[in-house]
Image (cartoon, rainbow, N blue to C red):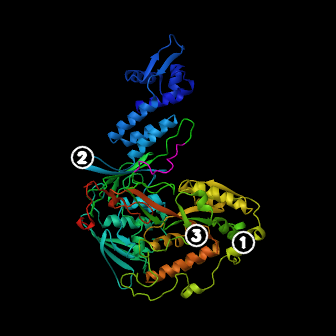
Amino acid sequence: MRLEEHYLELYRGLRLRLTDRQAEVTLPELSQLLHCSERNVKLLLRRMRERLWIEWRAGLGRGHRSRLTFAVDPESMLAAETERLLAEGRFQEVMALTERGAFTDEGAARMDVLLREAFGYRLQPGSGTSAEGVLRFPAYRIPAALDPAYTTRRTELHLLRQLFDTLLVYDELSGRFRPGLAHEAERNEAGDRWVFYLQKHVRFHHGKPFTSRDAAFTLRRLTDPDAGSPYASLFAVVSGIECLDEHRLLVSLHAPAPYLGSLLASPAASIVPAELPADFASLPVGTGPFRLKRPNARGLILEVFADYYLRPAHVDRVEMWRWQPIRSNDGAVRLEGDNEVGELNFRHYREREEAALGPRWREVERIDRGCKYVCLNLGKPGPLNDPAMRACIFRALRDPAFVRQLGGNRGDFADTFIGYEEANGQAPYSDTGKVTDAGTSTSTSTGTGTELTGRMQTEWIVGARQAEPAEQIEPATTVVRPDRPLRIVTYPGAGHELDAEWLEGRLVEFGIAAEVEQVEYERLLDEETLARADLFLLEQPVGEDAEWTLLTILANPGGPVRRCLPVSTEREVGERVTYALRHANRERRLRDLRAIETKLIEERFVVPWYRWRQTASFPQELEGVTINALGWADYRNVWFRAGLKDEAMSSAERITP
């Protein structure tokens, strides 16, 4: 701990006893306050006296009280030290200092200004004569583990894309797969054996060359049920993996899997080294455009990987820091200004609609392709087996006043898990036959994407009587109230706390008692949690590939949707998914998967709730800012324009790829 932190700890512990910045103390008291021995207390006091921070008049004799005088205002000292550390680029030490807190509204405001000026995109001195581009932003939590085989949360999935590469890459705009770490692929006529030709001259972040052994290890780990990956059932179609040589990989399948591209382009299939380092979960090693410095509880730092086999990123470093606004002496959090964005020159989103952008600011916006949703637990007996009760919950969630009451970046209601509306001017996939798998014929169907096809027209098993349309049910007169509160289970973060509190109050308006329980994300689907939960409040992240997302929702028996279905319905969903995935045509697979999704939503087994309104705000000098499908900025394309300011260059004079 730095001497400044000891000084702040000392001041905080004694400030209620101070008179004219003086307090009578004993060494045992200070030892307890600073959590160190009396000998160390004496050393600390001597160093503080040498810096003229304190005056110390020792008491005479054992047990006599000494007089301690604080000569330096701790807030001024904290601000001066913060400025010095920021100038030296020692941001981790800054965060440690600010966690000690300021003590007045003025001190809190001063520290907030210093930090906001340090966050955002900055050009700062680097090695040699060049400047380093650093993108630094605050976050409410720091990811603890980034192992692709086990990662399911939105932020972690985004970070995987920065740290790792996959054999194939799904192109959201064209709706096709393109080369990744595999530059070519070929299959046999039956479609159950694939050979992938791998890129040469690719290295992992720790310097080891990438070979077919790494790709084989990655896939074997995903197919091994004993490894415990939540994606194991999706990769169970793989029957064998063989390294033909260092840069050729043979993948054999139990049966043709036309959706293999979605598996291999997924974040779960991010290539990891065959010899996993012991600390891989906390310090993962990939081949991606950024590599991770050792994270800690306060922050996470990505450094550009200069040996990246594609074009290296323009940003030299990306820093994510756990940070909350500085608290004042009475514990209140100082709020932002009423109508200014503030000094922070890059924001992942504006917290308030009324926050004004400066005249030289720009903003990009995208509606989240994923959604917040509520999963009704029908895997156990209870009131939710009544369709009228499920319809009542649906109506409670669809209150038009919801977004207005909670605000933030909450957006429109969602009707499906995935936002299928056009993104960036092109549909994620087409229902007109324009998007097909390589080597398959083009469909001419013009269906809506929700009709059933072939065997899918058979009677749907729901395990409960058919529900009337939810909008025609009057909850006040038709719903039998449960004899106990419904338990809403969720996890901290992503706005769940406010959402769950609102839902609890909203259900009361319908005469339904409810209570909220927060559990750790990793414990959401424990048997004990499933036994208690009636409603799960969750978030569904959606990447570029809609098929992969539908597979994780519908084809994964271990996921929340399948775990919460009635037994008969869960079995039927599994059969229907198996049938849908046999189609060679991607469009038809997606239509059939969407038909299953639609039926589950119509039965109110799951209720999509709303989508985030994702924005990024930044000054005109910041270029290349786009929002990816997961709602984050794509760091590899961001750069800072520090060129001519007196006369703007026309677009014709710019060199663009």
Dot 1, how many residues are within 10 Å of its Cα: few (below 14), some (14-19), or many (20+)?
A: many
**Residue 423 colored in magenta in the image:** no
Q: How many marks?
A: 3
**SS class of the residue under badge 2?**
loop
Q: Look at 63% across and 81% down and name the residue there.
A: 460
x and y, in percent, of residue 90 in the image: 35, 41
Residue displayed at 52% across by 78% down: 593
* Residue of label 3: 562
Looking at this view, is 406 or 564 the one in front?
Answer: 406
Depth check, mark 1 against mark 3: the one in front is 1
Residue 60: % across, % down: 50, 10
Q: Quadrant of the C terminus?
A: bottom left
Image position, residue 111 (x, y; %): 44, 39
Q: Which label number is shown at residue 127? A: 2
Q: Which residues are magenta?
A: 333-344
Q: Which mark is residue 245?
A: none
Tag 3: amino acid: Arg
Magenta-highlighted stretch: main secondary structure?
A: loop
Report x, y in % for residue 133.
31, 52
Q: Which residue is mark 1?
A: 388
Q: CA distance from mark 2 to mark 3?
A: 53 Å
- Decide if residue 147 is in sight here: no
Mark 2 in CB contact with mark 3 (< 8 angstroms): no
Amino acid under disc 2: Ser
Pointers 1 and 2 in contact (C-beta within 8 Å): no
Instruction: Give the alpha-carbon distance from disc 1 to disc 2, as whole Å.
Output: 66 Å
Crowding near the residue tagged with mark 2, few <14, some 14–19, many ≥20 C-alpha atoms within 10 Å: few
Q: Amino acid at mark 1?
A: Ala
Q: Secondary structure at mark 1?
A: helix
Q: Earlier in the sequence, mark 1 or mark 3?
A: 1
